Image (cartoon, grey):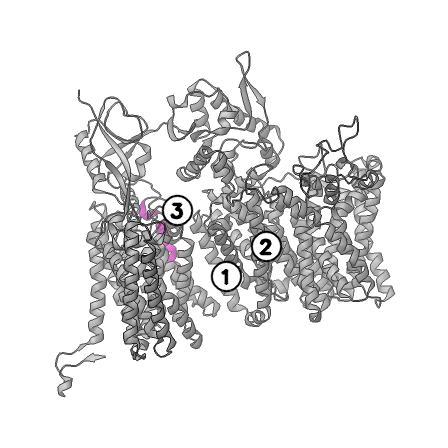
Amino acid sequence: MGDVLAFWFAALAVAAVGYPIGAAALRRLPDAGAGVSFALGLTVTSVLYFLLRVLTVLPPGRGGVFAALAIVALMSAAVAGRDRWLLVTWQRAWPGAVVAAGVFTLAFFSYTAFRSYNADIGGTEQPMDFLFLNAAITSPEYPPQDPWLAGEEVSYYYLGYIQSGVLTSIAGVPSSTGYNLALAYTFAAAAAGIASLGFTFARWILGSRKRGWAMAAGGFAVGFLLLVGSLSAVFEWSAAHGNTNRGLYETFGVEWMLPCEAGQSEGCYQGPTNPRTSEWYPTEYWFWWEGTRIIPGTITEFPFFSFLLGDLHPHVMSLPLTLLAVALAAAVWRGRSPLDWRRLRSEPFAGLLLALVFGALMFQNAWDVMTFSTLLGLAVLARNLRRLRAGGAALGAISYLAPVGVVALLLYSPWWLTFSSQAGGLYAYVGEGTTPAHAFLQWGPLLLAGMLGIGYVKRTAPRSLVVNAAVSAAWAPVLPFIGWLLLASVRDSLSDGLDARGVGGWWTLVLFGMTVWLLATTTVVLALRRSAAAPAAALAALGALLLYGAELFFIRDVFFNGIPRLNTVFKLSYQAWLLLSLGGGVALAAALARARSVQRLLAMPVLTLALLGLAYPLTASFNRTNGFENPTAIDGLASVAQSDPNEYALVRWIAQNTAPDDVIIEATGRRWARGSDSMVTMVDGGSDYGSGGRIASRTGRPTPIGWYSHEIQWRGDTPEHHAEFGQRQAVVDRAYTTANPADVLDAMRQFDAKYLVVGREEINNYPGLMPDYGQFLEVAFESGTYRVYMLPELRSIPTS
Amino acid sequence: MTVEGAAAAGERSAFEVRLGTLLWFVAGGLFLLLRIAGLVSIPLGGAELDAVSGAWQASIGVEDDRFVPTLFQAVTALLFQVVDTEFWPRVLAVALSCTVPLALYRLREQLTEAGALIALVLLALDAPGILIDSTANVSAFDVPVALGLLVLLTSTRQSPAVVALAGFLVASAGPIPLMLVLAAAAVRLARQEYPTVPTFAAAGAGAALAIALSSFQYGLGWGGLRIAPLETLAASFDSEWSTDPVRSLVTIYLVPLILVTIPAAAWSIGRAMERTGETFGVVVLAWVALAGLLMLASFGEHSSLPLAAFSLPAALVAGPALSRGIATLLDADWTWARYLVPASIGALFIALSFAMDWARTTSTGDAYQQVAAWGMLLVAIGGVALILSNRAAAPCAALVAVPFLVFPHIAGVSGVAFGGPNEPMPSPISPVQAREIRDIAVTARGEGAGAIVVHPRFERELAWPFRDSGEITIATQPTADTVVLVWPTDARRPEGYAIVEGEWALVRERNGPEGDWLDYLRWYFNRNTLGVGSLPVSVYLRSTE
C-alpha cells in the first residue's frame, strides 16, 4: 500500500507543479486545465529530463528526475509570477481542480485494485513494455540503450516509458511495481482529462444553468472512453449460456461464437458446450480477446481492452497527452484575436508550449501527431476566420504554426534522429472492407452518440447557410475517396479494390462517409454561426473521418504482405474512439438536457446501446480476474517470486549488483536439444513473446539479442538486420550449447559481456547441453540450481 | 536584555556583559564543542567513507565514481597529496562550520535575536548536522555555504565579486545550498523580483567556473559535464551512505525537530500572510518545504544527507517560532498548570516505565500491567486535556512532551558527536581491522616481492583502508606470485595458502532498531541492543612449507 500511496502522491505532485503552466494556457477552460494538468506536468518534466539527460546535464537515477521536477517548478513559479490573471483564474477554477483530483484519485485506486488481481508482467508484449520502462529508468546514457540489442539505442517512440519511469523514480518504487501503477496512472489521468473536457464542452454548449448535465457529459465521456467496449460481448455472454440464434449471430458476423456443427472445424466454437460456462459470466479463457479481432485482418482495440490486458503500450500511455492536445486546441479555438507570427512573437510561451505538447505526440505515439496536429490547425484556422477573410486566416495560421512545428522538430531532434521509422508510404486499401455489422458492434454506440451532435444545429439556422455548409462539407468524404481512386490507379490495383471490398464493405464506406458528411456539415454550420458547440461536433466529425479513412488507406509497414491494414486500423480507430467518446459524451448529455425534444427521444436508444456496451467490461473483468478470486499483488514480478523464488532472487541480484551497462548473456528464447544422432539441433526457433531476453526485460541490463522479430520491426526488415541479429542469436546459443570453453569466452568478449546467466529458461532451452561453466568462469551468484557466472578478472590497480 | 550588576547600585560598571552576547557565546561554544567532538570521535563511515575513498582515488589519478566532485572533495584530494588520514579534511570542515554561528548572528534581524539563538542551539544539537559538519563527506561545506548565501540574500548591497563567489560555491557544493537557491528563485520568480543583469551574470560566471572545474575534475581530466550539486543529490539516492534507511534515521534523530517544525511552519505561514512584502520568511518556508519533500522522497534510500538538508531550514523556521512560544509560555496562566504539568509528566513516565519493561522482555506484560499503563496514560491525557480546557493555560500543555522528546534527542546527539559505538549513524564504517588487513598484507609482501591479490568483490571497499599500499592485483584466481589473498569467506580455500586466523571484515555495519515501537523503545533505553553486521573476508598467506 505504501508504494501505491507514494505513486499516487507523486502523480498529484507532478500535476500540481504543472498546473500553473497549464492555467496560463488553458484559462478559458472552466477548471483552467486542472483535468489535463496530470499529462501536462508529467510531459514537461519528462521532456525536460530527457533533453537534459541527452545533454548530460542531469545525472541518471532519482536525483536527475527530482532535479528536472525542480526546474519545472521554477518554470511554473515564473509563469505564475507573470500571469496577472492567475489569482482570478484560481478563485474561479479551484472547484474544478478539486473535482479533477477527486476523479483522478478514484480512478487511480479503482484501477489499482482491479490490476492487483492480475499484476503479473508476462504474456503478450508486456515483457517488451517492461524492457523499455527499465531502459528509461536505468540507462546510464540518453537516448536510452536498447537492452535487447546490446550496444544500440532504442529505436521506438518511448516518451511514455520515460514518463512512467519519471513517476516510478519520484515515487521510489521498484520498476515491477511502477509498471502496474503507471497503468493505473494512465487510466486515472485519462479519466480526469476527459471528464474535464466533457464538462468543458458541455458547459460551453449548455451554459451555466445546466451545470448538472455538463457534469453528466464528463461522466458519459469517461464511460465511453474507459468503460464501454465491443458489443460482441453481449453475444458472447448469451452464447456462454447457450442462448444462440444462428440467424442473428450470422447477421452480426459473429457466427464463430456458435458451436461447431458436424464436420465443421474452423470459424466456430470448439470448446465444451455443456455447460459452456460455470459462472454467470463467460469463463472461456480470454473470451474478451476476440472482441478486438472481429474485423478480419485488423485489430480494433479500445481503451477498456487495453487496461484489461495490461500492456503498457505507447498508444495507451498517450491517452492523457492526446486529451491535453485536445484541450490546447479547444483553448486556442476559444480565444479571440487572430493568431499569426506577430502574436507568436508577443506570446512566445504559448507557442513553445504548443511545440512541446504537439511535438511530444510524435515522441509518445507517432501515429497521434498527424491527427491531433490537424485538430490544432483547424482550431487556429477557425479562430482566425472569425476576424479575417479565408486567405488571411490561412496565411496567419501558417505563419503561427510553422515556427511552432520547427521548434517541435528541434526540441525532439535527439529522439527522431535516432528513430528509424518503419512507415513505407501511404497506400490505397484494396482488400475486403469492414461489414456494417462489425462496424456497428465495434463503434456503434460511439458513432451514434456522436451523431446526436447533429442536433446542435437549431431549426432557426438559415437554410442557405446549411446548404452551403453541406456542399462544402461534402469534400470531407469525397476528397479522400478521390484520393483512394487515384492512389489505387497509380498502384495499379483499382479493379482489385473495387471487387475485393465486397458489398458489406461498400455499405460501410457509404455509412461512414455519410456520417462524416453530416457531422462535418454540422461543424461548419456551427462554426459559421460562432456556436460554442462547434468543437464538440468537430471532434465527432474527425473521429468518424478517421474510421472512414482507415477503410480507404493504410500506411505500409512490416505487415504489408500479410495483413496490410492491421496497424492503420488499430491506431486510427483508437484515436477515433477517444474523439468519439468526447464528442459523443457531450452530444448525449446535450441531447438529454433538452426536455421534451426529439433529441432526447433519440438519445434514449443511444444510451441503451451504451449500457449494452458495458457488458464487455462487466463480463471481461470477471473473466480476467477469475471472478476476483485471483491472489492479489501490485508487484509485477510477485508471481515469479512465488512460483520460482530462485529465478526471482537471480533477477534481483542482477538488478542490485551489476552496473546498468553491464552486458549479460542469457537465453535467446530459441530451444535446442540433442537429437538421436547426438547432434544439437534447434527444436523451436521462436524468440518473441516468450522467454528470450527476460533478464534484460526485468532489469534493463543489455543482452546481445532479445526478441528478434521485434527488433526487425523497430529497425527495418533488411537483409543486414537479419544477418546481424541472426549472428547474435547464433553466438549466444553457441555459448550455451558448446562443449568448448573458448566459444563461451569468445561470445562474452565479442559482446563485452561480463556475466552469463543460467536460470530457469537456460535450463529449459538448453537441456543437458551447457558446459560446466564453473570450470572456467567465476560464480558470482548462486540460488538453488541457478547461477550467474562472471568472466574471470586479472588486473592491477595502484593505491598510491 | 542586559545584566547590569552595578546598575542596581545606581552606577555603570566599566565591564558590562550583555546577556545576549553571553548566550551567543554559550550557544556558539556548544555548536563548536560538538563539532570538535565529532571531528575526533566519529568513526569513519557512511558518506564520509565514500568521499575519502573517492578523494584518495582522485589524488592518485584513478577514476572513481565516488569522486563527485564537490569543492570540498577536491580540496580533500589535494590534502591527500600531503597527508593520508581523514583528520585534516575534517579539521577543514569544522573550521568552515565555525561560520555557522556568525551567519546566524548576522540573521538576527530576520529571525529575531532569540529566534536566531534558538536556531543555533537546535543546529548545535542536531545529530545529522554534526555528522555533516564534522566529517570529510562531500557535503561538508554545504551548511556554511547555504547559511552564507542566506546572509547574502538578505544584504542590500551585493557586490558582483561576492555574488560570483556565491555562484561558484553553490555550484561546487552539495545539494543543500542548491535547495536554498531553488526556493529563493521560486519565490522571487513568483513575485517577479528578477535579479539585475550584472548580478545574474556574476552568479552565472561563478557557477560556470565551478562547473568547468568539476567537469575537468579539478585537474584529473575531462569527466564529461559534471554539476557537483546534482551529482551529489543523485549519489545520495543511489549510494549506500547509511545502513539504515532515511525513515529509520528520521525516527531516531529527527522526530523532536519535526514535531516542533510543523506547528512552527504553520505559525510562520500565518505571519508571512500578514506581512506580504517580506521575502525572507517565505524563502525559508519554501526551503523547508523543499527539504521536507526531499526527505519524504528519500524515505527508502540509505543516506543521512536528506536529514541534514532538512534540519538546517527547519531550525531557521523553528527558532523564531520557539522564541515566540517561550514568551507565550511565560505569559500563560500557570494557576493550575503548575500542578497539572508535572502530574501529567509523572503519569506518562510511569506508563513509559511499564513500556520500557515490556520492551526489555519483548512482551507486552500481563493484564494488570496493561491496565495500569493505560490508566496512567489516560491520567496524563486527562491532565493535558484539563490544561487545554483553559485557553490561557493551553500553551503549558506543550511542556508535557518536552522531557520525552529532549532526553532521547540529547542521547542521540551525544552518541553521534562522541562517536558512540551503538549509534546507527554513521554506518557502514571502515573498522580498524580493515587497516590491519592491509598492514598484514603489506608486511607479508615485504619489499615488492609477490602480489597482494584481492577478489573483485572487495575492490571498492579496499580503496581507503589499502591506500598507499603500492600495486594491488584484482583477480578471481590467485596468481603465481600471490603472497597474500583477501578472499570471500564463502569461496573454496585456495591450495597452498594458510588462513590468517580471526574474524576479518573490511566494512562493519550498525543497524538501528527496526520493527515495532517496542524495538525503538528498547534501543532508546538500552543502546547496546544495536545490531551489527559486517562484510567478512578471509585473509590467506602463501604457505611456506
Between B376 and A52, which is closer to the camera in this rendering?
A: B376
B257 in the magenta segment: no
- The span from disc 1 to disc 3 (Cα, nearest Å) is 27 Å
**Residue B53 placement (x, y as % from top left):** 28, 44
Q: Which residues are magenta?
A: B205-225
Q: Residues within 10 Å of mark 1 (few under 14, many from 20)?
A: some
**Residue A466 placement (x, y as % from top left):** 84, 62
Q: In this figure, which residue is indicated by the disc labeled 1?
A: A75
B216 in the magenta segment: yes
Res. A460 image quadrant: bottom right
Host chain of mark 1: A
**Residue B254 placement (x, y as % from top left):** 33, 59
Residue at 86% x, 61% y is A467
Are discs 1 and 3 both within one chain? no
The type of residue carrying mark 2 is Ala
Tell me which secondary structure the magenta stretch mostly adopts.
Answer: helix
Q: Residues within 10 Å of mark 3 (few under 14, many from 20)?
A: some
Q: In this figure, which residue is indicated by the disc labeled 2?
A: A107
